[in-house]
Structures are given as C-alpha cells and as structure tokens.
Amino acid sequence: MERVPLERKVLNENARVASELRVRFTERGILCLNLISSPGSGKTTLLERTLESFPASERVALLTGDIQTENDARRLARFGFPVKQITTGGTCHLDARMIERALADWVLEDIDLLLIENVGNLVCPSSYDLGEAAKIVVLSVTEGEEKPLKYPSIFFKSELMILNKTDLLPHVPFDVAAAEQNARQIHAGIEIVRVSCMNRDGVDNWLGWLQRKRAAARLAAVSATQP
Amino acid sequence: MHEMGIANAVLDAVRVEALRFPGSHVCKVALRIGELAGVAPDSLSFCFEALVRGTEMEPLTLEIQYCPRRHQCRRCGCSFSAGIEGLPCPECGGVDSFFAGGDELEIAYLEVEDGARTAGT
C-alpha cells in the first residue's frame, strides 16, 4: 500500500474557472458581487431597490439563480438593465461554470457592476467561488438572530451582512444587537448594514457601500494598467 | 444539499489521479473538511458510498479529517482551536488573533494498492 499526498482542493475545477472569471472582472474594473441568503430573505427586492436608484446610463448587469422559474429575471428586467436568469434545474447553488456560460454572449466592456443573486440557500452557495470580489449575506429579521451561529460558513466568508426587513422589527421578537454580535463572533471584520426595502430605511447606506466598492474596483483596474 | 456534487468532484479527482498508477487500484481517499467549509461529513460519506457502490472503483473508502476552526494569537503566536464560541488565547488570554484554518475542502492523500511504485509520476 502506498500513500500518495495530493494537497488539492476538492472543487479545484470550480476554483480554476472562478479565478479566470476574477481576472476578467478585475482587469476591466468590474465589481462582481455574490448575494447569498435563505429563500425569502429579500434578495430580489433589495436588487429592485438598488436598480431603481440607478440612472438608465448605469453600466450594471445581473444574473439571478433559481432552481425553477424565470420570475426573478422578469421582476428585475423592468428596470431596463441586462438581466439573465440561471435556472439550475434542482441544483442548490450557482457554480463558476454557470456564470461563465451566462456571460458568454455579454460584452463585459459594457458593464462595470455585475450583481449575482445566488439560489436561496445559506449552506451550499458558500462552497462555490464565482469569481466575485465579495460575498454578501442577506439576513432578514424574520429568521432568528442565531442564523450566523447555525450557518457559520457563509457569515465567515461574507464581507457584508445586510440585515433586511427592519420595518418588521416592531412585530417580531428579533434581537438586532444579538444578531450582529453573533455575526461578528463568526467574522470579526464583517460589515453590517440595516435595511428596509419597504420604507427604504438604510437603503442609502447599502448604496454607499456599493459605490465605495465600485470606486475601489475601478481604481484597482487603473493602477494595474499603469506601467 | 450539495454533498452529492462534492462526492462527485472527489471521485473525478480520484479517477484522474488513478491514471498515474496504471494497473493499480486506488483503495482510499482522505479529505480535510473544515468546520467552516459548509459540508456535512455524514452526508458526504453517504453520497460517496452510493456513488462508488457497484462501480469499478470498489473497494474505495473515504476518510474524513474534520478540521475545527483555528486561530493564531498575535501576542504569543500560539495556534489554538477557536470553535465558534469566544476567541481568547488559551495560553496568554490575548483577544487579538487571526484566522489560521478551518475552511478546508481538500484532498489530503490517496492510498494506492501495491504496484503503484512502478508507476512514473
């Protein structure tokens, strides 16, 4: 019997495609964000609030993943920006190959913000790198403040946590401070923005975060091309 | 759950690596799975066994090395298992530490039956 050390990632094919995508995005100054949450936490509505704040000239494109139906793409297409639905047909997450295929007939030079709405699931999407600059986890106040402790992987890997549906706080027993403390226990450096997509509280904070990240992505691409 | 896809990716890797050892049989594959990897070891083992059963890959066993979250203390430099509850360093009590492992999803090694030694790698 011989033991052969391998030291390779299990998902190394996904990692390879994701790193190719990341190079394509960063070279062009495209900010790619991967939004992950449980089903029904409000990812699509958050994207609607985001798109409605943009002028028509905004260079944004969206990919939205679901197991079935084109409903989300229809909701998001109303704003006139390029949107493509990825229906996974049963798979509980998006992978890098799906993103690569979805982008095949888009001209990347025409966009500088790519928003990916992952399949509603707090577990599996956390394992699959899509070439994004950052993962964003959306947690809604109807879900319980222990979610970060129960699903540590996605909170650990996300740069930003959006605490959504804050308009419902008067009606649900949700402890905001405990939820935020739990998230920071898993990931000390996680940024947190509280948002209500119904009354727009906090939406500007989210948009501000987004614009800061976009500026940083543009700057990084420009400095990379300087001799 | 995505453990079936992970199990498939492990078996793909085993198939590819097995080509390096013609005439031999890969009988074991060992994985390192961190507690932050988002993969359930029991579910993965179940999927793995289901995929291997009745194929030419039998007998093939799966070993899972579960890796707890680890931190390293910035003050005294010691590494410790951090879990998800509280992070002070068990050696010096320092609260400033950085993440040093626990999100692994890696193949550590294969075991190949005798005969592998003759293979060129």
Image (spheres, grey):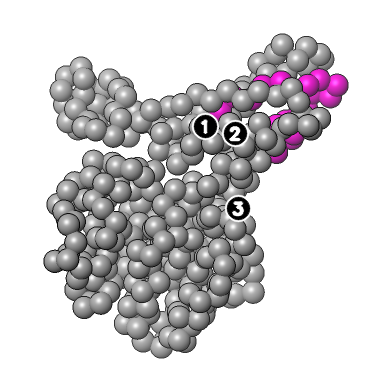
Q: Which residue is mark 3?
A: A17
Q: Which residue is mark 2?
A: B46
Can you tell which quarter of the image residue A98 is in? Answer: bottom right
Mark 3 or 2: in front is 2
Kindly identify the amino acid type of the residue bearing the numbered disc 2: Phe
Q: Is residue B41 left or right of residue B26?
A: left
Compared with residue A14, is residue A132 higher up or lower down, i.e. above or below? below
The chain identifier of the residue carrying mark 3 reads: A
- Residue A86 position within the rendered picture, expressed as x and y whole percent measured from the top left: 57, 67
B13 or B5, nearer to the observer: B5
- Magenta range is B11-31
Q: Are marks 3 and 2 in contact (CB under 8 Å)?
A: no
Q: Residue at x 23, y 71 (%)?
A: A196
Q: Is residue A26 magenta?
A: no
Mark 1 or 3: in front is 1
A115 or A144, nearer to the observer: A144
